[in-house]
Amino acid sequence: MVRDFSKLMDYARHVASGVNKVIAEVVSGGPSRLYEASLHLINAGGKRLRPLALVLSGRMYGLDEGVGITAGASVEILHNFTLVHDDIMDRDQFRRGVPTVHTIYGEETAILAGDLLFAKSYEALSRLTGLLPAERLVNAFNELTWAAVTVAEGQALDMDFERRWDVTLDEYLEMVYKKTAALFKSSLVIGALLAGAPEAEVAHLEGFARGVGIAFQIRDDVLGLIADEAVLGKPVYSDLREGKKTVLIIYALSRLGPDERSKLVSVLGRRDAGVDELREATDLIKSTGAVEFADRLADEYLRSGLDSLGKTKPVDREAMDLLVDLAMYVTARNY
Amino acid sequence: MVRDFSKLMDYARHVASGVNKVIAEVVSGGPSRLYEASLHLINAGGKRLRPLALVLSGRMYGLDEGVGITAGASVEILHNFTLVHDDIMDRDQFRRGVPTVHTIYGEETAILAGDLLFAKSYEALSRLTGLLPAERLVNAFNELTWAAVTVAEGQALDMDFERRWDVTLDEYLEMVYKKTAALFKSSLVIGALLAGAPEAEVAHLEGFARGVGIAFQIRDDVLGLIADEAVLGKPVYSDLREGKKTVLIIYALSRLGPDERSKLVSVLGRRDAGVDELREATDLIKSTGAVEFADRLADEYLRSGLDSLGKTKPVDREAMDLLVDLAMYVTARNY
């Protein structure tokens, strides 16, 4: 049964349009080359789903949509900052189907463009000064900061894992929570905090974000192994070539016999690995049932997230329903 | 006549000790390699003069010293973030007499360490949540953000100038204001804002910071040309090799005849330039009277800054006197 996401998509476009206007205002100035570099990835696409989550969680507790959109620009800019720097660190050449910032502008400017975006994410939020009780804005700043710290820690773990062969599932889940789920969590929390939602409600949203965020990343890992380049917006096999310890790799390494394990290890993390080797490695991974394992794990996390959302008491029920749609949308099996 | 800075130095040590404690608390956690890299430069030294300025401007309007020290840790961490990333961009191998972060930990980790410090600068400030009226804290966050944006713009200008030969003195002054004076200005302003100082007072502090900050950088340019390695904490001639458009270079280029100008241009920005060429280039620059010009310019900016400070109406006169000492100290001719 295919779920109908048309209502969610209509609202997503509406929010994205508002968010893009705020971003264009905030990320403007000179020197022009720095600002061009800073806008390159943002303008290359993206559905603005984190801002959407923020607007919806805010609406659940009565937050004005326009306020949510401004704060949404903040988390979207922060997200793009992390992508610009991650692409340098991971030496990725493509994202969203276009060359990465450092590929076009050079590494120096890409580092600086990321830094500027980082600062601009706070500037976007600062536009709410005077429009809300200052206490709420302070809470939102602090949550944004928590996200920025946590995402950096998650990226460090992800890089450390590239050099390790004994990463456990629990370590993977910690990394994914920090690198991927944390900013989704903070988006939801900032919406609720700006609305002045009670602490218990914020805790339920955190549970929702944790489940959905981890489920999303697990599905993304699977997609990274089996989707084609057009869907990924970047070369296939990137994860294998970079030696990323995805849930699939961790599972496969724990299941393969010594010989096959050695074969897989000999390919992972080799940037010059050939397509034939990579295809063989993919088959090895699949042969362990890693994809089915990942799917079940994602289903469990999604279920746990939805359960947590079900405990909230929103004033705007439609906003909550759209958040459920969003959860189903980002964790859908597109393979 | 040598000015006696012993009182200032005693107080600077007192503030630095408090700031270092806050930094150690805020910049702690895991993964350990990331945190080690983040602390490397901070622990290599530095007099914590920006925190000192913040504490003193706060005290001028009645701010609790402990509050100023916590906020001071914030600007110090932000400062160190910019140094870590600048060193990558400028490919500098030494600072404060030790190898730079990327030289030890690699570029990927250095980028991430800078990002973490950036986030931690906000985390330090967030420790004041609930201790002060939230409006003041929001103002401080916004000022910190202004500094982060402005310093990034200043660094972009500095890098752009390396590839240009027609940089004017006005362009130089704008760059220096953004890259160097801005964070000093924000340090002073944050102290005053946290104390709830009136707007007119904040404006006078801004004028003070602008004058002193620019004067400091002009002196630093001169020092970069004529001091030895032990004083600089980095190799001599770095500025020349990187093609930095210091006030000395801009002045010299405007004064030299075509042949000598060509000779200077042929050395600047060449990372493989030999010591003999560099010594010759230095002599050429000095022959134009660039050092004397720079000294006069620094004197003027210092004077203008002190005039602006003189217009303030502090409640703590001793704090203001120490700020005058600080201005004299950072702009002293150590050559």
Image (cartoon, coloured by chain):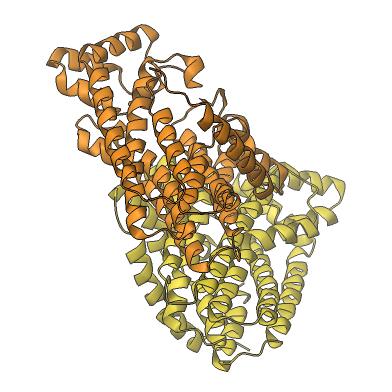
Chain colours: A yellow, B orange
**Is residue A101 visible in the rendered structure shown here?**
no
Residue A248 screen position, x and y as percent: 73, 60
Outermost residue, top direction?
B276
| Left or right of residue B29: residue A51 | left
Residue under the image location 46 percent in, 61 percent down: A122
Which residue is pictured at 40% across the width and 34% down the height? B327
**Between B244 and A3, which is closer to the camera in this rendering?**
B244
In percent of width and height, residue B197 lies at 42, 58
- x and y percent of residue B130 in the render? 61, 66
Could you tell me how many numbered marks the image carries?
Answer: 0
Q: Nearer the viewer, residue A225 or B75?
A: B75
For the C terminus of chain B, give its image quadrant: top left
Q: Which residue is depicted at the point 51% across and 40% down?
A: B52
Is residue B138 at least partly visible in the picture? yes
Vertical position of residue A247 compared to residue A219: above or below: above
Question: Compared to B17, does A208 lie above or below?
Answer: below
Q: Quarter of the image containing the N terminus of chain B?
A: top left
Q: Is residue B102 left or right of residue B263?
A: right
Establish if A126 lies above or below A55.
above
Task: Say which quarter of the image contains residue A117.
Answer: bottom left
Counting from the top left corner in percent of width and height, residue A329 is at 58, 79
Residue sitting nearer the eye, B2 or B50: B2
Q: Which residue lies furthest to the left in this view?
A: B257
Q: Is residue A190 above or below residue A38?
A: below
